[in-house]
């Protein structure tokens, strides 16, 4: 797409009306039962102003930030949300807001000049292409030992993720968040999160016939023949819309190769759920393309928050300072950790404790592909939304989602993203020479995850007489061991914060995103991030406001 067609997208403040119109919302009433069309907004009609004083400022608009904003607003507090990415509400010249995974353009990547796809090769040949530098929706942030994929824009990770909305087994919860009351989470906060996110299940009868899930049925057959438990996975996709896509009666998104560079129609991102409800309160204002760089104690109480306003090529066009009584760090595991580590190390927030930056993990992510026999085609048309997984956690330490490879041609490949029980944890630290935050992760640590994933796929290959694909992640490379989609930790609950996300050392500073969770959730993480945020904000509202 030409640059001119998108220049200006997302640079303006987000009014409630524009925001809702831009969602192309199929929901007249939000998943929370709150009408999304209501009386005129009392939220500010502009980007946050330089010199403003606000009661609550939320850094980031992903899961943690969206929960905090909605619940604070419902409790009567005005909230300013600040988001470094754009507002994704305007179609480009192709009529779509987002590009397909098969044809990334400038909208796909955060300030890169070349795409960096997780499946980087096909038949061994590199497939990444040149793109214009732009504030695109997916950040492939590179640290020394790992590339961390994250969503950028209003809605955070919900814009780019696969929508797999998995509540971990309660028996495994104590290994995920040992200081949190599991009974309360499973009776109150997981149900609250699932309802508000609009989580739903695939119709099992339709699954059996839908051509777009042939790849998942092949995955199920192979898992079953090797004796592995296979399970449907709930998602935040609108399943009626998915059926209509398969029937070709609506514009396609999941069936048109849209996923990690955004989804135009059927996925219930936070823009359609929590954030729509938050804006409908009239108490929430969101400023896109604003990146927070500092949070310092203000002389007269509260905090001075410094932020840079960006244009769509990433140039700083203004710097603002705002005073906030309370600040919620919801910039994601990497964003929050980087900010806190920098602020502690540079003497801005010296009272943060020594746990800040620690306990970071990759949720054990590792990918692989298998080459099937010619009599096991996985289908030309593949839904980008995974709906099933193989659970070998107890026996082998791996939960593998049966993932799509939506190329539009028959590949005879089965692709899997495994989440594994790795105990490796890395630490963020400030590098005074580069003035940047480093991460101590080592690529070699992924061997633990590979060993666990192999407990599933070596057995399946042996049973089926098949082999690993060696052409998807580089020439002759079986494992994609250089990335994570699921960064977790860096400001771990009950360590860097108290047991509700209040940062030690500073009253009025809170962490409310994936950085609270120490490195692993045993399944895909966003339902747990959302449920924990629901738990913590309820306590904070009851006691601190
Ligand atoms: P997150 O959603 O990342 O939101 C943080 C926000 O803060 C972002 O919008 C940032 O742009 C913004 N930000 C960062 N720094 C700053 C700053 N300095 N100033 C202003 N704004 C800032 O955080 N999880 C699942 O459970 N199921 C899936 O199927 C799944 N698939 C995924 C697929 C992909 C390709 C990716 C990348 C992730 C996937 N995830 C999935 C992970 C999931 O999206 C992620 O765990 C959550 O989005 C994390 O939520 P947080 O609230 O921690």
Image (cartoon, rainbow, N blue to C red):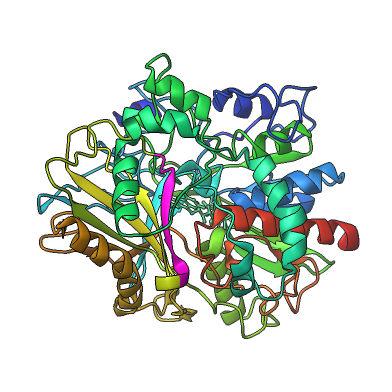
Residue 390 belongs to the span the image colors magenta: yes
Quadrant position of the C terminus in the picture: bottom right
Q: Nearer the viewer, residue 281 or 304?
A: 281
User: Which residue is found at the position 57% from the left and 81% from the top?
Assistant: 345
Q: How many marks?
A: 0
Q: Is residue 47 above or below residue 392?
A: above
**x, y percentage for residue 173?**
62, 68
Residue 263 belongs to the span the image colors magenta: no
**x, y percentage for residue 495?**
67, 80
Question: In this orientation, does residue 320 appear?
Answer: no
Asked where in the image residue 302 lies, by quadrant, the reply is bottom right
**x, y percentage for residue 58?**
68, 53
User: Which residue is found at the position 59% from the left and 36% from the top?
Assistant: 271
Asked where in the image residue 485 lies, by quadrant, the reply is bottom left
Q: Please give the range of residues in magenta.
A: 385-394
Q: Nearer the viewer, residue 296 or 465?
A: 465
Q: Is residue 505 left or right of residue 113?
A: right
Q: Is residue 428 left or right of residue 31?
A: left
**x, y percentage for residue 238?**
53, 30
Q: Residue furthest toward the bottom?
A: 354
Q: Is residue 521 above or below residue 387?
A: below
Question: In this orientation, does residue 423 appear?
Answer: yes
Q: Is residue 335 left or right of residue 296?
A: left
Q: Is residue 356 left or right of residue 409?
A: right
Q: Is residue 294 above or below residue 466?
A: below
């Amino acid at each position: 797409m030409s640059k001119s067609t998108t220049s200006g997208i997302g640079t303006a403040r987000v009014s409630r009306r524009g925001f809702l119109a831009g969602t192309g919302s199929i929901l007249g009433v939000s998943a929370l039962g709150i009408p999304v069309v209501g009386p005129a907004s009392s939220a500010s009609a502009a980007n946050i102003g330089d010199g403003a004083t606000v009661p609550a400022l939320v850094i980031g608009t992903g899961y943690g930030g969206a929960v905090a904003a909605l619940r604070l607003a419902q409790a009567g507090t005005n909230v300013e949300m600040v988001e470094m990415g754009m507002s994704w509400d305007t179609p480009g010249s192709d009529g779509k807001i987002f590009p397909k995974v098969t044809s990334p353009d400038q909208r796909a990547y955060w300030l890169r000049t070349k795409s960096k796809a997780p499946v980087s090769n096909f038949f061994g040949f590199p497939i990444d292409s040149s793109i214009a530098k732009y504030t695109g929706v997916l950040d492939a942030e590179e640290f020394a030992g790992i590339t961390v994929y994250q969503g950028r824009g209003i809605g955070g990770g919900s814009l780019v993720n696969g929508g797999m909305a998995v509540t971990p087994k309660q028996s495994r919860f104590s290994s995920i968040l040992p200081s949190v009351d599991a009974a309360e989470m499973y009776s109150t906060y997981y149900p609250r999160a699932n309802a508000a996110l609009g989580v739903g299940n695939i119709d099992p009868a339709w699954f059996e016939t839908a051509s777009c899930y042939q790849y998942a049925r092949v995955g199920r057959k192979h898992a079953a023949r090797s004796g592995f438990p296979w399970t449907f996975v709930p998602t935040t996709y609108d399943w009626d819309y998915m059926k209509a896509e398969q029937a070709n009666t609506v514009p396609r998104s999941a069936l048109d190769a849209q996923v990690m560079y955004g989804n135009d129609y059927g996925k219930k991102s936070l823009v359609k759920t929590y954030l729509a409800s938050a804006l409908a309160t009239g108490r929430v204002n969101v400023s896109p393309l604003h990146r927070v760089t500092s949070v310092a104690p203000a002389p007269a109480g509260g905090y001075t928050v410094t932020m840079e306003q960006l244009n769509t090529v990433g140039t700083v066009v203004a710097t603002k300072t705002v005073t906030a009584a309370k600040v919620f760090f919801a910039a994601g595991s990497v964003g929050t950790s980087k900010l806190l580590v920098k602020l502690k190390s540079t003497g801005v927030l010296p009272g943060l404790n020594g746990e800040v930056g620690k306990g970071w993990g990759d949720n054990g992510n590792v990918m692989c592909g298998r080459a099937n026999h010619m009599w096991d085609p996985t289908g030309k048309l593949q839904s980008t939304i995974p709906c099933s997984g193989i659970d070998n956690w107890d026996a082998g330490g791996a939960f593998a989602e049966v993932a799509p490879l939506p190329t539009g041609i028959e590949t005879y490949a089965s692709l899997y993203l495994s989440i594994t029980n790795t105990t490796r944890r890395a630490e963020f630290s400030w590098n005074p020479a580069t003035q940047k935050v480093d991460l101590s992760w080592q690529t070699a640590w992924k061997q633990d995850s590979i060993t666990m994933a192999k407990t599933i796929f070596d057995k399946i290959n042996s049973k089926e007489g098949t082999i690993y694909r060696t052409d998807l992640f580089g020439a002759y490379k079986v494992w994609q061991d250089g990335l994570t989609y699921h960064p977790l930790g860096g400001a771990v609950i009950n360590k860097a914060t108290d047991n509700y996300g209040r940062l030690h050392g500073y009253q009025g500073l809170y962490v409310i995103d994936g950085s609270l969770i120490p490195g692993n959730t045993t399944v895909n993480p966003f339902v747990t991030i959302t449920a924990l945020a629901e738990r913590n904000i309820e306590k904070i509202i009851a006691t601190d406001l």
